[in-house]
């Protein structure tokens, strides 16, 4: 069974600032233009992410964990950021490490193995795969990254690998819910037991599903997009997404293992909704289904760390990573007050504070958030990635 999100409550105190580093080689720099502010030129947040969290061999490390773990999630997000930054050298390093270490070198067009989700330090001190089960959200992102890299960089080898990986996901990680349609399992093993199918709302980014549906119209992706909306809407009766939910006896129910809490996983549900193109027919309904978070931030001035998806009862204050996730959400809702609060908090990401170490999840969700609101990337209605360097920066 995959334990996806390590609770990072202890990292809240560390999120007031991140040390910015002064040098990074290999990033393809693009010229300044009249594009959106911050859309062109050096992406300092990305540079800091690569310097702090990406080894020379392409391994993304979460230092906040005892195992110094690498997850397929981290690799998939790193690939996406490298594509947004037009940094093909880092993209290829990340892909090569993923192939060798998470997929056991079985990661080519004719032989694709879903990558293990967790790799790191074992009890005996050696390093390797800690959990061989794969994580479907990461697999989706990697397939999407490859398809978009093939299109944007004009290299069909990425495209073909992305197609092969997507086909493997459809075979191993997609099930059918009667009366609903296709649904993404969190992984191939351990999520369907005794009549209960456990599901994760944060594993279903609307733009990624749209992009897969556009590139692979014969797959389950278009139908999965509709199923995903129904799932998210149904499991957020108070406008708050849970971390986990389940399917039992023909309906979506509270997850029997984790309950109805929404926290470190669920915060990404708002992020993915905010990233969707306004022209996507599901963008507004998806955002509307998640209105509880907007109301709670307007009321309290901060996002709750934990919230009950069934009652709306909230506790704690979310860390900096939450503001990264919510920045696109507020922007897409035209909520200037919420967006202003997010910008003010996210300024800490690039503030150099001696003795304060960058926090992995803060930096990752911060890159998604600031990259989007600064115009470094967006998605079109078909789910295609539109990076700033492709048009606005020339």
Image: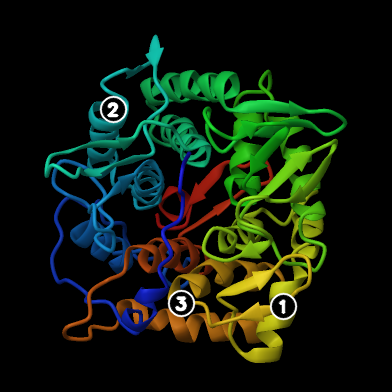
Q: Residues within 10 Å of mark 1 (few under 14, many from 20)?
A: few
Mark 2–mark 3 distance (CA, rounded to whole Å): 33 Å
Question: Which is more toward the observer, 38 or 321?
Answer: 321
Q: Position of residue 70 (x, y in %)?
A: 29, 47
| Mark positioned earlier in the residue sequence (2 or 1) | 2
On the question of residue 220 being in view, the answer is: yes
Q: Secondary structure at mark 3?
A: loop
Q: Secondary structure at mark 1?
A: loop
Comparing labels 2 and 1, the label whose residue is closer to the camera:
1
Residue farthest along the bottom direction in this orientation: 300
* Quarter placement of the C terminus: bottom left
The residue under label 1 is: 313
Mark 2–mark 1 distance (CA, rounded to whole Å): 43 Å
Comparing labels 2 and 3, the label whose residue is closer to the camera:
3
Q: Position of residue 374 (x, y in %)?
A: 48, 69
The residue under label 3 is: 319
Residue at x 53% of width, y 33% of height: 187
Is there a contact, CB below 8 Å, between mark 2 and mark 1? no
The residue under label 2 is: 99
Residue at x 37% of width, y 41% of height: 72
| Mark positioned earlier in the residue sequence (2 or 3) | 2
Above or below, comparing residue 102 to residue 91 in the picture: above
Q: Is residue 296 left or right of residue 172?
A: right
């Amino acid at each position: 069974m995959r334990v996806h999100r390590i609770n990072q409550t202890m990292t809240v105190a560390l999120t007031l600032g991140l040390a910015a580093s002064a040098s990074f080689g290999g990033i393809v720099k693009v010229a300044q233009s009249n594009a959106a502010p911050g859309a062109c030129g050096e992406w300092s947040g990305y540079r800091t992410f690569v310097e702090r969290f990406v080894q020379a061999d392409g391994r993304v490390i979460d230092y906040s964990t005892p195992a110094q773990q690498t997850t397929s999630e981290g690799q998939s997000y790193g690939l996406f950021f490298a594509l947004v930054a037009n940094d093909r050298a880092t993209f290829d390093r990340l892909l090569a490490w993923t192939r060798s270490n998470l997929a056991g070198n079985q990661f080519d067009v004719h032989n694709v193995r879903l990558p293990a989700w967790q790799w790191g330090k074992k009890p005996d001190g050696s390093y390797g795969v800690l959990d061989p089960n794969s994580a479907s959200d990461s697999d989706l992102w990697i397939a999407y990254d490859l398809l978009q890299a093939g299109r944007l960089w004009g290299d069909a080898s990425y495209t073909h690998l992305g197609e092969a990986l997507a086909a493997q996901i459809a075979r191993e990680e997609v099930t059918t819910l009667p009366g609903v349609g296709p649904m993404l399992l969190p992984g191939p093993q351990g999520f369907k037991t005794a009549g209960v199918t456990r599901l994760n709302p944060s594993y279903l980014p609307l733009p990624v599903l749209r992009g897969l549906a556009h590139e692979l119209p014969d797959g389950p992706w278009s139908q999965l997009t509709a199923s995903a909306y129904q799932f998210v809407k149904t499991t957020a009766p108070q406008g708050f997404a849970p971390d986990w939910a389940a399917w039992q006896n023909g309906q979506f129910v509270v997850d029997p293992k984790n309950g109805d809490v929404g926290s470190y996983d669920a915060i990404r549900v708002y992020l993915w909704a905010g990233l969707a193109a306004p022209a996507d027919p599901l963008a507004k309904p998806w955002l509307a289904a998640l209105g509880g978070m907007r109301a709670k931030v307007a009321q309290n001035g901060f996002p709750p760390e934990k919230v009950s998806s069934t009652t709306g009862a909230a506790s704690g204050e979310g860390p900096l990573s939450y503001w990264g996730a919510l920045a696109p959400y507020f922007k897409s809702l035209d909520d200037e007050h919420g967006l202003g609060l997010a910008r003010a908090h996210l300024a800490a990401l690039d503030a150099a504070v001696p003795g304060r170490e960058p926090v992995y999840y803060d930096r990752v969700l911060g890159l998604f958030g600031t990259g989007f609101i600064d115009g470094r990337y967006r998605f079109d209605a078909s789910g295609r990635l539109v990076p700033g360097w492709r048009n606005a920066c020339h």
